[in-house]
């Protein structure tokens, strides 16, 4: 007898079910007596935003898709897909740093489905991948409905398709591809990654425990000092 065929995976259904679980987990986190009023995404983003305002570490969308960018993007996804640009067309209700929720809300209004990917950023010292979500319209067109933070002025996003991962309510942050052998940069990114691992144990938008908030803050401050040549 032949093997029984598995039913195809409906990524939109998985997305909606996991989001419902995320809401339940978030309510538990918010009632924790040791929780601190600190959003995972905003905390990490604010610190890194301040640090990367300098020229050497300012992260921007790569102007062109060169071999180094392709190698980094493929490393992030583990596939041989080619990165590509998509237009940034925010909806009026969308907020920065909340791509998965922005897409969920857009799907509820107009249909379509999520398209998971890595948003690619680059500075002089490294290439960075953020787990990201685009809106795929019913006709197949991909649109980034999530705005950048004020002052970024990006009009397009470079993305690498991610065929294996779905947003499951957990914070899944960044990957790095180092462009230098400078030990300060290498050690700083290792510290940022350690902070990422702590935050990834929490549901997205959850509140960090007081202990974990302190651990993350210390790691990020030490990493910042390394990059600025102070530690």
Image (cartoon, rainbow, N blue to C red):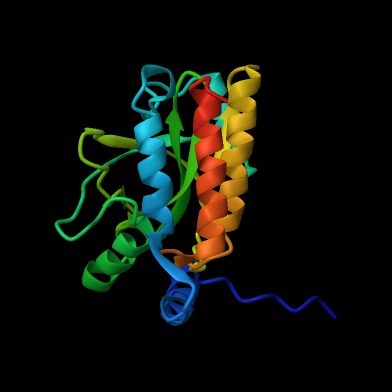
Q: Is residue 188 above or below residue 137?
A: above
For the question of whether residue 104 can be seen, the reply is yes
Residue drawn at point x = 51 percent, y = 41 percent: 220
Total labels: the figure holds: 0
Name of the residue lying farthest toward the right? 1
Could you tell me which residue is drawn at 22 percent across and 57 percent down? Answer: 94
Residue 51 in the image: x percent, y percent?
40, 31
Query: x%, y% of residue 208?
Result: 48, 64
At 40% from the left edge and 54% from the top edge, which residue is drawn? Answer: 41
The answer to which of 70 and 188 lies nearer the viewer is: 188
Q: Residue furthest left?
A: 92
Q: Is residue 92 left or right of residue 45?
A: left
Q: Quadrant of residue 201?
A: bottom right
Q: Which residue lies at the image location 34% right of the left edge and 64% below the top edge?
A: 101
| Relative side of 190 to 149, left or right | right
Q: Is residue 59 above or below residue 86?
A: above
x, y percent for residue 89: 21, 46
Q: Position of residue 69 (x, y in %)?
A: 52, 26
């Amino acid at each position: 007898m032949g093997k029984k065929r598995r039913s195809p995976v409906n990524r939109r259904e998985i997305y909606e079910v996991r989001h419902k679980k995320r809401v339940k987990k978030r309510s538990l986190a918010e009632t924790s007596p040791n929780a601190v009023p600190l959003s995972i995404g905003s905390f990490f983003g604010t610190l890194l935003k301040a640090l990367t305002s300098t020229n050497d570490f300012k992260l921007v969308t790569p102007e062109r898709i060169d071999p180094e960018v392709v190698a980094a993007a493929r490393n992030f996804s583990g596939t041989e897909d080619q990165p590509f640009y998509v237009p940034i067309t925010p909806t009026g209700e969308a907020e920065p740093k909340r791509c998965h929720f922005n897409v969920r809300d857009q799907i509820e209004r107009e249909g379509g489905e999520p398209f998971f990917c890595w948003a690619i950023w680059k500075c002089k010292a490294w290439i960075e991948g953020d787990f990201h979500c685009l809106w795929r319209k019913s006709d197949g067109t991909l649109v980034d409905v999530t705005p950048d933070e004020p002052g970024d002025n990006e009009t397009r996003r470079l993305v690498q398709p991610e065929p294996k991962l779905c947003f499951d309510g957990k914070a899944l942050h960044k990957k790095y591809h180092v462009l230098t052998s400078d030990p300060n940069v290498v050690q700083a990114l290792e510290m940022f990654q350690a902070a990422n691992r702590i935050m990834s144990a929490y549901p997205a938008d959850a509140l960090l425990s007081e202990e974990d908030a302190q651990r993350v803050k210390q790691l990020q401050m030490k990493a910042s000092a390394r990059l600025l040549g102070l530690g």
